[in-house]
Image (tube, rainbow, N blue to C red):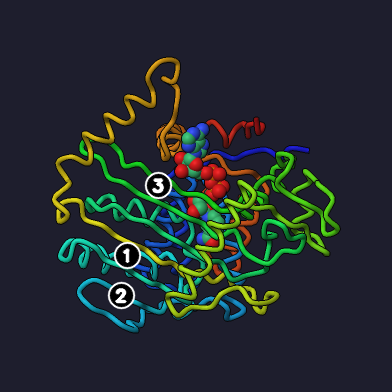
Amino acid sequence: LATQNVLVDETKLHDFVVDVFTAAGSSQREASLISRHLVDSNLRGHDSHGVGSIPVYIRNLKCGDLLANQALTLVSETDSFLICDGNGGYGQVMAHDAVAIGITKAQQSGVALVGLRNSHHVGRIGHWAEQCAEAGLVSIHFVNVVSDPSVAPFGGVAARVGTNPFSVGIPRDGKRPVILDFATSKLAVGKVRVAMNQGKPLPPGALLTAVGEPTTDPSILFSQPKGILLPFGDHKGWGLSFACEVLGAALTGGKTQSGPKRRNATINCMLSILISPERLGTADTLSPEIDTFVGWVRSGDNAGVLLPGDVEATTTGERHANGIPIDAKSWSDIVAAGREVGAEPPSSILEPAVQANVRSAS
Ligand code: NAD
């Protein structure tokens, strides 16, 4: 059965999430960075990486698998690269700070490589591509996930890897950047959780039961023995997942997934390559050439073709205007997690139309 959605005011949601994380012991800066990231993920339509993550973060914090108020440890550094350790701290802070250092280096050197290892969950990877694009930089991000293995490699029937995400960001003159950002599994784990909370079936072909039978029931991924996600694009998705695992973790001195889950935390390692078109001397041609290419791609009957990032931009516009829909189960879990640390949402956080009449999920 589908559960109902609540519609939440974006600004009040951001303030409430800041309250939750400061109440949980984070500095104001840390809580603000976490909140901005989570609320932006909801705005982009990636509810899997939005405020629905709060109960998991609070649980990990309470059991000591996530540490508040950590700072990056710089392991090695030159003008054009940085390897740093996130010390199991909030990924929304660790990735922000690592990428910020990389931006300065790329603006000076033309190209910078940033290896962030041993960070708690860095969330929606497109957020980091957007951070680079805002600074005029192209970026490529390879990320591994050390957690409960959830994805079978192509040709295998047992879960061995995480959903290893990949992202590319490309700034454009006078237009929003192109942001490609996806998990290398057919579905991100968080999307399966959202479907379960909404009482909705999964699309066929994404999930197997523990004994290898196809299923569309999202709860199978969270039951014992748990189900198994499949990589997107068969051998191609598996190949990209492999690259994310090895480049994200092994190359940065981090840990690959090398056995069953040992702790609650989801640990991410991220290799980011930042490129300055300005320093390369190609800034003047990059945007016009993308325009030419996009014009060709959309010519003839292809006018409706979307670019990476278009869906998220449309959803962001809608949610800015109307509020952020959150399924009722996720919302009650978020409120309960807030109460656990002593933070209470204001009753006015729900959009007025919805306070009176909670609308049905479509
Ligand atoms: P997804 O399947 O929704 O794919 C998103 C990408 O496809 C975007 O670039 C989007 O613009 C593009 N896209 C979507 N529809 C399109 C269309 N019709 N035409 C053209 N392009 C289109 O993403 P996902 O795999 O569900 O990943 C969701 C989020 O989960 C991502 O932000 C990812 O970074 C995040 N994630 C994080 C972790 C982690 O451990 N931190 C792990 C896995 C995934």
Instruction: State which quarter of the image contains the N terminus.
Output: top right
Residue 362 falls in which quadrant of the image?
A: top right
Name the residue carrying label 3.
11
Q: Callout 3, which amino acid?
A: Thr
Task: Identify the mark nearer the N-term, 1 or 3.
Answer: 3
* 68 or 261, nearer to the observer: 261
For marks 1 and 2, give the one nearer the viewer: 2
Task: Identify the mark nearer the N-term, 3 or 2.
Answer: 3
The local secondary structure at tag 1 comes to helix
The local secondary structure at tag 2 comes to strand
Give the Cα separation between the discs numbered 1 and 3: 25 Å
Q: Are marks 3 and 2 in contact (CB under 8 Å)?
A: no
How crowded is the residue under tag 1: few (<14 C-alpha within 10 Å), some, or many (20+)?
Answer: many
The circle on residue 99 is 1
Give the residue at x 57% y 34%.
354
Q: Callout 2, which amino acid?
A: Leu
For marks 1 and 3, give the one nearer the viewer: 1
Residue 57 falls in which quadrant of the image?
A: bottom right
The circle on residue 19 is none
